[in-house]
Amino acid sequence: MAEINITEQEEKKSLNFIEQRVKADLAEGKNGGRLQTRFPPEPNGYLHIGHAKAIAMDFGVAQKFGGVCNLRMDDTNPQKEDTEYVEAIERDIKWLGFQWGKVCYASDYFQDLWDFAEWCIQQGRAYVDEQTSEEIAAQKGTPTEPGTNSPYRDRPAEESLKLFREMNSGNVEPGKMILRAKIDMASPNMHFRDPIMYRVLNMEHWRTGNKWNAYPMYDFTHGQSDYLEGVTHSICTLEFVPHHELYDLFVTWIKEWKGDKDDIEDNRPRQFEFNKLNLNYTLMSKRNLLILTKEGVVNGWDDPRMPTICGIRRRGYSPQAILNFIDKIGYTTFDALNDIKLMEAACREDLNTRAIRVSAVVNPLKLIIDNYPEGLVEEMKAINNPELRDVEGNTITEGNTHIIHFSRDLYIEQEDFMEDGGKKFMRLGPGKEVRLKNGYIIACSDEQDEQGNFKCIEKDENGNIICVHATYDPDSKSGMPGADRKIKGKTLHWVSCQHSIPCEVRNYECLWTCENPRDAIKQYEKENGVRGIDAMRPFLNPDSLTINKHALIEEFAKELPALSYLQFQRIGYYNVDPDSTPEHLIFNKTVGLKDTWQKGGK
RNA sequence: UGGGCUAUGGUGUAAUGGUAGCACAAGACAUUUUGGUCGUCUUAGUCCUGGUUCGAACCCGGGUAGCCCAACCA
């Protein structure tokens, strides 16, 4: 029995239109008060962020109202499907934090579906058609013109039955015969024009082996599987709205076949549709993602630029970040194009609470503290996560710190020093004073030599700044009373030369330069007569991946496990790539920190 | 041009015949040992047009625009 187990406040705030329907159905006692959903991926590829939205709905609604959600592999087309995807799908759903009741397969119902199809033939509701696919297509009509009946439409049931069994013998060539439902060739709904129930494939199925040679189509499988499995709410995306009526019809038939006398309105699976996820600057279709991997545009399905769950995971998103995002965009029946910035915002929001702060210098500039004793090394305490707070709102320090080393020779970020930064530039430069995070207050002198060159700056022969000199205030050590004094400058991150490790930093941007790559590619294909990768190239962002092999990071980061959530302070969120080793550290940029300086300040 | 669906600030979403609200984005201020976070404020909206009603984003008619449907894919 399903239970409504959410508080009224929560309910008011967050029930989307499908949840409202589910709640109402439960209240009315439909389906005997049961709630069962299913997530039905076809195991022919990797799950992407669009699937995550469906997962959050299918599993989420079951969770919220005390129902159960099964994972059902929609494996009715053995030409495309493979067991390798099943594992990946299961892994991704688990990673998102959901649990299924059981794992089912559409192929579990092949025998039932077959028997049901035979019954349909005997009932005069189905027939074997021996026309070519071209002939059938021609007879189908168009959205504005009715179709015409197949010459085989009224053949005797016994004849169809005999041929149907032959279809599964392996002796019928694919394309020679199909089983069609006898419905209405003039229906304004194209799906009612004698839809195909079974086709011959003569192909081994990864689960059922060689038992079947003819396989059922989606429309003749989905609703029936729902019915046989006990699904009450079959939730899918909007493109299945035109299938809705046919879904209901086949469910009605199969209930009849089963001799199920329950009231049709109250005890049957019902389909509900919501808008699928569209993200700007993102391409979601499996077909096109496959091209990207095959052509080497990306490095596999889990490339951090891919919208796949595994790609997003490797990029450094947490499951909660994804779920937060999905929660923000909501479920409606409007075909929306969501802004990737909202996803990034949801990510920052989540990672802010869980990322460990580390110091990393991405573009190092040497900084020498002239008055700091040579050879001296001090251990400084660095807070792992300032958002970890006690009930009073104070940052918890116990168990929330790590050690960072301070010495005379440091690296700071190149962009944190400017010879003539101007008044608004609050970082380091001649005559400027800044604080080194968890360290000391330092200052550069504005003394100049006879040529008018600043004494604190060392340049190479090309005039590039290669080293800067500063002096520190020994009383200003972080944590000491002298550190309290206010200064004009900002707080900079830094690493110690001797105590930092070189690492590789991979920065990612959108793969696409246009908001809606799907449409752009489609149009380009049309206008230029090219297909696939050639139609995609004009819209690919050449800078979607930039690798920086000269970054430096504090030693603490050396032994962190793969996929650890990090924040490079003042730069962005990063995570440890699965290929990273202590000998060759690799970090992926998940998303940058908000930067009101670069945006507004300059 | 057949059928189905949709339309609320730049984006997404709420209000289910009774005060158009929230988040993101954009901008400003304040705070800050992250130009982050947190906080305050500003900008900005019911596609058009008729009707029903005391009252319409919501109901109805007519436009307009967009999406889905003519796979032996799902």
Image (tube, coloured by chain):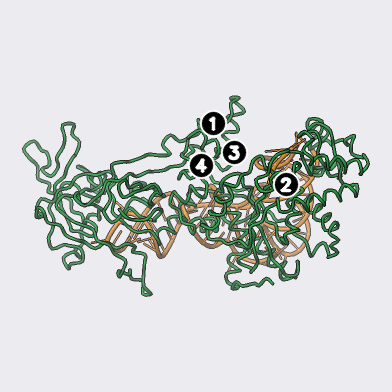
Chain colours: A green, B orange
The disc label shown at residue A218, or none: 2
Question: Which circle's residue, 1 or 4, is located before the other in the chain?
Answer: 4
Residue underneath mark 4: A281
The secondary structure type at the circle numbered 3 is helix
Total marks shown come to 4
Q: Are the residues flagged by discs 3 and 4 in contact, CB closer than 8 Å?
A: no
Query: Which percent across, then down, holds residue A277?
Result: 58, 49
Q: Position of residue B57 (x, y in %)?
A: 67, 56
Q: Distance between the residues labelled 3 and 2?
A: 19 Å
**Mark 3 and mark 1 in contact (Cβ < 8 Å)?**
no
Label number found at residue A287: 3
Q: Say left or right for A538 vs A108.
A: left
Which of disc 3 and disc 1 is earlier in sequence?
3
Q: Which corner quadrant holds the N terminus of chain A?
A: bottom right
Q: Earlier in the sequence, mark 2 or mark 1?
A: 2
Distance in Å between CA atoms under marks 4 and 2: 31 Å
Rendered location of residue A121, percent (x, y):
88, 47
Identify the disc placed on residue A141: none
Give the residue number, with chain letter if any, for mark 1.
Answer: A533
Instruction: Give the foreground label among 2 and 1.
Output: 2
- The residue sitting at 12% across, 49% down in the picture is A445
